[in-house]
Amino acid sequence: MTNIITIACGVILIILIPLLLNCFLPSINKASWLAFWGSYIGGLLTSLIAIFILNRQLRQNYKENESNRQLQISVFQYGQKMALLQDLRKALINYQVSYNFLEIDRIFDHMIKGNYNEQDCQSLKNLIRDVDGKNLLATSIIKDLEESEILNEYKIKNNVLYDNYCTAIVDLLFFNDFIKDIPKGDTKRKEYINRETSDDVVVDNKICSLYKSLKYEIPKSIRSIIREIKDIENLEKYAPAILISRLKDTDPGNDLKDKLKLTIVNLISFEKEKLDKTLKENKVSS
């Protein structure tokens, strides 16, 4: 609306100026007026053409500047997201490496040989703290990613691996205390074993379905293995067999760890390709 008013005022002024001059300068002859009008109209047309070209150039410059600005923003955002992706890559690698099944196997072997000590228990607790801390860092970054098939695959493998790893550690900690505190009397022994093994961990249905989706069996808890022993009077004698049986259920852990590593590589590659594609599209549109 403002532009229309401005144009209308300009047209009125262009028409009025010669008329006003005619009023104030009545002595000018026709030849002079014709010369005036020729110069006036010529100058007017030249000015209009110059204004048109200038306006067009300004619009073109504005469009180019806006495209360049959008491209700069896209490149800046790309740099930010690439830095975040590098942080995610580092966090996921550190997290995957933190699964120390070699240490778990060492402690299993130690306990199978009848060695129960606080140093091993402290080592097991440190393993949980380490994996929990690195999992928290990775999760805090990965939560900002858009949902995708590869991200869902990572979450499934991560949940199963975490459950397999932590339940093995919890079972070892439990068995270390359990075996050392078994009473000697038959009555007390039976009551103690029933009490300690009855409070088993309830496996979540979601975890069960995740194990099945990866074609793994849910690890049998060490409490359920103990309950299968009928000769409770000589339970200590079966301790190595109990531990060996539980150790077998941790075997998928190393396989899962390797599969998680491959999934992490694929996830990072997928996210990088997505960023590169977005930047390329922004360059084309600019």
Image: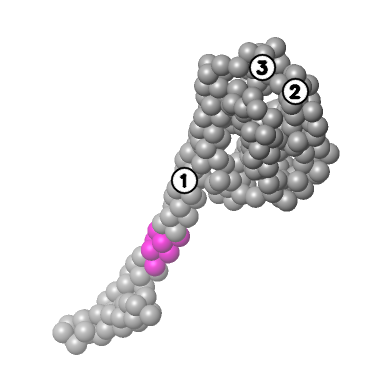
Cα–Cα gap, marks 1 and 3? 59 Å
Q: Quadrant of residue 260?
A: top right
- The residue under the point 51% across, 32% down is 133
The kind of residue on which mark 1 rests is Ile
CB of mark 2 within 8 Å of CB of mark 1? no
Task: Judge whether residue 217 can be spotted in this image.
Answer: yes
**Quick check: 127 above or below 149?**
above
On screen, residue 62 versus residue 248, left or right, reads left
Q: Is residue 125 magenta?
A: no
What is the x, y in percent for residue 217?
81, 37
- The residue under the point 64% across, 24% down is 184
Please, what secondary structure does the residue beneath circle 3 have?
Answer: helix
On screen, residue 9 versus residue 53, left or right, reads left
What is the x, y in percent for residue 172?
64, 26
| Sooner in the amino-acid sequence: mark 1 or mark 3 | 1
Please, what secondary structure does the residue beneath circle 1 have?
Answer: helix
Q: Which residues are magenta?
A: 48-56
- The residue under the point 75% across, 29% down is 232
**Quick check: 285 above or below 105?**
below
- Judge depth for marks 2 and 3 and give the one in front: 2
Q: Quadrant of residue 160?
A: top right
What is the x, y in percent for residue 4?
38, 79
Quick one: 218 or 58, which is closer to the camera? 218
According to the picture, the residue beneath numbered tag 2 turns out to be 234
What is the x, y in percent for residue 191?
66, 38
| Sooner in the amino-acid sequence: mark 2 or mark 1 | 1
Tell me, for residue 73, which label it has, or none. Answer: 1
- Judge depth for marks 2 and 1 and give the one in front: 2
- The residue under the point 51% across, 41% down is 140
The kind of residue on which mark 3 rests is Met
